[in-house]
Image: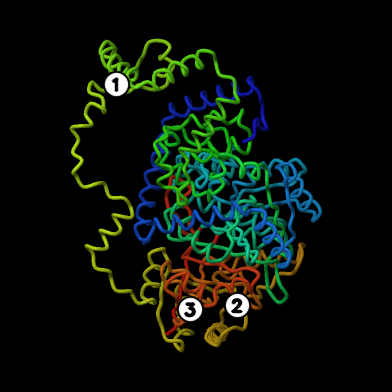
Amino acid sequence: MRSSGSGASGAGGDLTMRIRFRRRVRAAITNPSLQVALDRNAERRMIAWRETFASLPDVEDLRVRAREVRQHTLENLDHYLERFTQRLVENGVRVHRAADAGEACSLAVSIAQARGATLVAKSKSMTTDEIDLNHALQQVGIRVVETDLGEFIVQLRGEPSAHIITPAVHLLKEDVAATFERELGMPYSTDVEDMNAAAHKVLREIFLEAQVGVSGVNFGVVETGTLCLVTNEGNGRMVTTLPSIHIAIMGVERLVPTLDDLALMLQLLPRSATGQKITSYVTLIQSPRREGEPDGPDERHVILLDNGRRVMANSPIAESLLCIRCGACLNVCPVFREIGGHAYGSVYPGPIGSVVSPGLFGLSDFGHLAKASTLCGACQEVCPIGIDLPTMLLRVRDAYTKNTPQPPAMRLAMSLYAWLMISPWRYRLAQRLGAWGSRLLPRQAGWLPTLPPPLSAWTASRHFPTFAFQPFLARRKKLNYGAKPMLTPKRRKRETEQLTEKPQPEDVVERFGRELEDIGGTFVRCEEGEAPDQVAAYLRELGVKTLIAWGEQQPSLNAVIHRLKDEGFEILDPDLPRGSGPGRDQRLADLGRVDAGLTGAIAGVAETGTLVVPAGRNRSQLASLLPPVHLVLLPMGVIYQTMADWMAEGGEEAIAGTSSLNLISGPSRTADIEMTLTIGVHGPGQVIVFCLD
C-alpha cells in the first residue's frame, strides 16, 4: 500500500480527508432523494442477482474456478503480460505501457493530437476515470463526450460516477429531467423513454463525428491477444467501430490466460453486475481493420496501465486485484446503501473501493475509508471471485493505524480495550457491569442513543446496542447442538439433487428461441427456401425502405438480398473510406439514417439466446449496430447449447481469425435511470432472428 496519495498527505492531509469524508456522509444520510434512489437500486439489483444466479448450476464450483484463474494470473503477472503484449503486436495492435496516471494520459493525448483529433467519444471505463483522462484531453482543447447513458448524465452535471456499474445511481428521474432540460434544451419530461431518446439523438451525432474512440477493457485474453468489452447499450461497440482510431486503456491485472477462462468469467460477470445471464453485447477485438473488411478502426492502441498495481500485487491486499469490477459488493453493503458513492471521495467506492483506493492512491489519504464498514461479510458472500473483503479491510485498518498518527485519547482507549479483552475474567466482569450500567441510560427501540464521554464519540453518529443481561457464554450450554446444521451451498446442492429429478435437456433450437424472446428478441422459425418471403414480409410490415446488409456470403443470405433488391428495397454500400475526412463522415451520416440491417450469424448459443456475429470480408459490423432493426439469418445446425460447446467446436478459431467478433444477445438496453429498463439505446431496439431449418 502506498503511504501517501496524490492529494494532501501527512497528518494534516489525513485529518482534512477524514473531515471531508464525514461532511459528505452527513450530507448523504440527510438527503431524502438520495436515500430513495439508493434503496431502489439495491433492492432491484439484488432481486435480479438472486434470480439470475438461480439459473446457473454449480455456482460455488464456478466461483472457485474463477478465483483460481485470477489468482494464478496475478501470481504470474509478468509472464502473462509479456505474452499478451507479444500477441497484441502480432495482431497489429500498437501497445504502450504506462507506469502511472500521468504517463497514461500523456500517451492518449499524444495519439489523439498526432491524428488531429478534436472530438473523442468515450465508452464507460473506470480505468480512464482513475487517471482522469477527460481532464487531460480537455486541457489540450480536445472535446471528450461520455457515451454511456449514466456517464453522459453525470458528465452533464459535472459530477463523478456514483457507482462502478450504475454511474447515475444517486439520481431520481426528476433530477435527470431537470438536467436534460437545462443542458440539452429538452422539454421537461420524467418519461424515461423520452429522456433516453433525447440522449440517443445527441450521442448519435457524437458517434458519427468522433475521430477517436476510447474504451476500457473488461478482460484481455493472453493466448489470442483479444480485448473483451462487456456492454449493454451499444456505445462500447460504437466507439470501437466507427472512429478511425481506437484507444483501449486497461489495468495490467485484467488478464485471463485463455478463451476458456474468458468463457468462465462471462458466466459470472454479467450476473453479478447487472443480473443478466449475458449482456447485450460482448465484443471480442483482435486487430485493426483488415484487408477487405468494410469497416472498423484503421488503428488500435492499447495502453497497459500499472499505476500502483504491481506494488499492490506484493502487498497484504493483493487479493483485491482479483476483482472483476462487477459492483455486487456495493449493492449489498449496508454502508454504501446509506451514503452512496460520492461520499467516499474516490473513483472506486464501496467495500472494494475502500481497499483499492488506499492501495492505488495512498494510505494516508484514503486509509480511513476502511473504517466505513460493518465487516458483516455480505460483500464476500456476493463476490463472484470470493474475495475476502472483510480481511482486506482489516489489513487496511491495521496499516492505516500504524502509519497514521492517532489522537492520544484514541491510543489510550484502544490500549484499555486490549487490556480488557485479553483477560477472560476482566471481559466477563465488564459484560456484567455494562449490562447493569446500561439500565441507567435512556433507550430508544432497544438501542442506546447516547453514551457518556468518552464513549459519546460513538453515539455522535450511531446508536449503541444494549448489553445482553445473559451473555452468550452463559447461554451457550443451553443451546441444542443436536439440531441439523445449517445448509452450506455444497450441502444444499447435494441434498437438492437427491430430492429432485433432473429435467430432460430441452431441444437446443427451442431453448434458443425461448431465451431470445425472454430478452426482448423475436424468433422466427422457417424453411431456408421460405426465408426471402419471410424477411421481405417483416420489412414491409415495419415500413423499412433502406438497409445495410452483408455482402456475398452463404447462399441463403444471398437469396434474401437478391429478393429484397428485386422488390425495390434500397441496400446501401457499407464500405467506409479509410482514415478520417469528409468522405468517411458523409458515408457514416448516410448509413446512420438506414432503417434496418441484415446479417448472418456463424453460431447461436441456446443457454443465453446469443448470436455470434463476426467482422470479416463483406461482413459489415454496422449492419448489426447502426439501424434500429437488426435481422439475422441463423442456420439451425449452428446452434449450440452452451458457450463452451461452441468454443470446443471451432469458436476459438473463429475468434482468432477475425478482427472483431460480437456476441449479440437481444436488443440494446439500459437501466441507468432509476433502474427503469429501456430497450433500444445506441444499438438496435429490435433483433429478429430467422432460424433456418
Q: Compare marks 1 and 3 and give the one earlier in the sequence.
A: 1
How many neighbours does mark 2 have within 10 angstroms: few (below 14), some (14-19), or many (20 or more)? many
Q: Find disc 2 in the rendering and name its residue.
A: 550
Image marks 1 and 2: residues in contact by CB distance under 8 Å:
no
Q: Gap in Å between the C-alphas at discs 1 and 3?
A: 65 Å
What amino acid is at disc 3? Leu
Q: Gap in Å between the C-alphas at discs 3 and 2?
A: 14 Å
Q: Compare marks 3 and 2 and give the one earlier in the sequence.
A: 2
Q: As rendered, which of 336 and 262 lies closer to the eye?
A: 262
- The residue drawn where x is 71% and y is 47% is 143
Image marks 3 and 2: residues in contact by CB distance under 8 Å:
no
Q: Quadrant of residue 313?
A: top right
Q: Which mark is residue 634?
A: 3
Q: As rendered, which of 385 and 460 lies closer to the eye?
A: 385
Q: Residue 466 carries which label?
A: 1
- The residue drawn where x is 41% and y is 68% is 607
Q: If the image is split into quadrants, where does the C terminus sit?
A: bottom left
Q: Gap in Å between the C-alphas at discs 1 and 2?
A: 70 Å
- The residue drawn where x is 20% and y is 35% is 479
Whether residue 616 is visible here, answered yes or no, is: yes
Q: In this view, does 590 lie to the left or right of 520?
A: right
Where is residue 641 drawn, in percent x and y?
42, 73
The colour style of the image is rainbow
What amino acid is at disc 1? Thr
How many neighbours does mark 3 have within 10 angstroms: few (below 14), some (14-19), or many (20 or more)? many
Q: Compare marks 1 and 2 and give the one earlier in the sequence.
A: 1
Q: In which quarter of the image is residue 6?
A: top right
Q: Is residue 193 left or right of residue 570?
A: left
Query: Which numbered mark, 3 or 2, is in the foreground of this view?
Result: 3
